[in-house]
Amino acid sequence: MPRAIITGITGQDGSYLAEFLLNKGYEVIGMVRRSSTITFERVHHIQDAITIVQGDLHDQSSLVDVIEQYRPEEVYNLAAQSFVPTSWNQPVLTGEVTALGVTRLLEAIRLVNPETRFYQASSSEMFGKAVEVPQRETTPFYPRSPYGVAKVYGHWITVNYRESYDLFAVSGILFNHESPRRGLEFVTRKISHGVARIKLGLVDSLRLGNLEARRDWGYAGDYVEGMWLMLQNATPKDYVLGTGETHSVREFCEVAFRHVGLDYDKYVVQDQRYYRPAEVDLLVADPSRAQTELGWKPKVNFQELVSLMVESDLKLVSQEVR
Ligand code: NAP
Ligand code: F7E
């Protein structure tokens, strides 16, 4: 039975990846940071099938201990301070976790068991003020937030450890991927949850920032398969994962409100508080390398994704008000 460690298992992607690996017959070890409250909501349903171990990307020795204790074949580094606006308020913490945390984990692998295969969760935010459209593996980076800058560091240190120490270390440059398990502060979930609350009569407006920003939105469940495929490759190589389609925040609103028979224009209020000091205006992937070399393709399209999220939030919010 292959063994994998997932950092960030309590996050959106960690929970889908854990399910995916369990279905493939893996033993799954989830690394979690200590907290005074339980944050296992997303993995509650599989908690008996996984092993939870404490560790923190801030703490080198905890990472060495986890790798030494479990000696996994694969490590997926999904843990990060992942919310872009927070990275302006907490730039140093973001750098510590999202950037230096990667080096700490790579060091633990290099020192304890360099045979371990390593996946780094890189991000399309690294393309930022994109210098070409669509963005692919060779597109130069131009990050626009402390989060994007930290991810560029995490990306290059992964490449550097691969080239310096011959580690099987790869980086997946993933475009936005969403789901009913997305955190409530990210725009897609904020919209689907807002639509449900408006439809059920709990609130009468939804306050958002820049409606013209465009993203390449896919379904998180599809993307975790791509992470796994990258670690099964014959040679370590980086890949872009995305749908190749781009939509604006405004379009996401239109489709989400229309799904429940409402007109978004009557409910959405633009609020300066949600604008960013520097915006990423347009992201769209060229995922052709992953399609050709890994056979990876997203299965859920934009309309299906929006419907899936709105339906899930309608159910959730109606249960809460009952
Ligand atoms: P998420 O839901 O925000 O999950 C982040 C995870 O990191 C949580 O489990 C969190 O634990 C953990 N974490 C935070 N700080 C930590 C620390 N110091 N030590 C250990 N664990 C820590 O993120 P996601 O959407 O699943 O994304 C997964 C990864 O992919 C992240 O690295 C993100 O930056 C990257 N990414 C995401 C997307 C996307 O569209 N979702 C696209 C590209 C790249 P708690 O539960 O304790 O907070
Ligand atoms: O913003 C605009 C906002 O916060 C998307 C993370 O997973 O994907 C995610 O980062 C867009 C931005 O995601 C609101 O200005 C408008 O242009 O959902 P988001 P993100 O910043 O793209 C990347 C790939 C990651 O790696 C990150 O970890 O939507 N927007 N109004 C808004 N955004 C938010 N959050 N809230 C609003 O009210």
Image (tube, grey):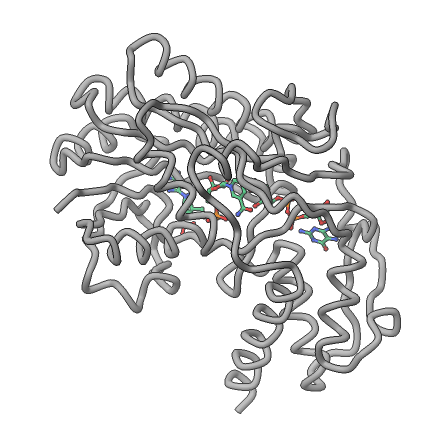
Instruction: Indicate left or right for 46 with 137 as reference.
Output: left
Give the camera-side residue of 258 and 317.
258
Question: In the current view of this chain or complex, which residue is farthest to the front?
Answer: 292
| Image x and y of residue 77, in percent | 37, 36
**What residue is rendered at 62% in x and 71% in y?**
307
Residue 128 to residue 37: above or below: above
To which quarter of the image does residue 185 belong?
bottom right
Give the camera-side residue of 203 and 290.
290
Residue 76 to residue 212: above or below: above
| Image x and y of residue 209, in percent | 79, 52
User: How many tags in the picture?
Assistant: 0
Give the camera-side residue of 89 and 121.
121
| Image x and y of residue 90, in percent | 58, 35
Instruction: Indicate left or right for 95 with 119 as reference.
Output: right
**What residue is rendered at 26% in x and 58% in y?**
23
| Image x and y of residue 62, in percent | 23, 33
Instruction: Indicate left or right for 71 with 224 as reference.
Output: left
**What residue is rendered at 75% in x and 41% in y?**
276
Residue 262 to residue 244: above or below: below
**What residue is rendered at 73% in x and 60% in y?**
252
Question: In the current view of this chain or complex, which residue is farthest to the top?
Answer: 164
Question: In the current view of this chain or complex, which residue is farthest to the right?
Answer: 266
Residue 256 to residue 164: above or below: below
Question: In the current view of this chain or complex, which residue is farthest to the bottom?
Answer: 322
To which quarter of the image does residue 240 belong?
top right
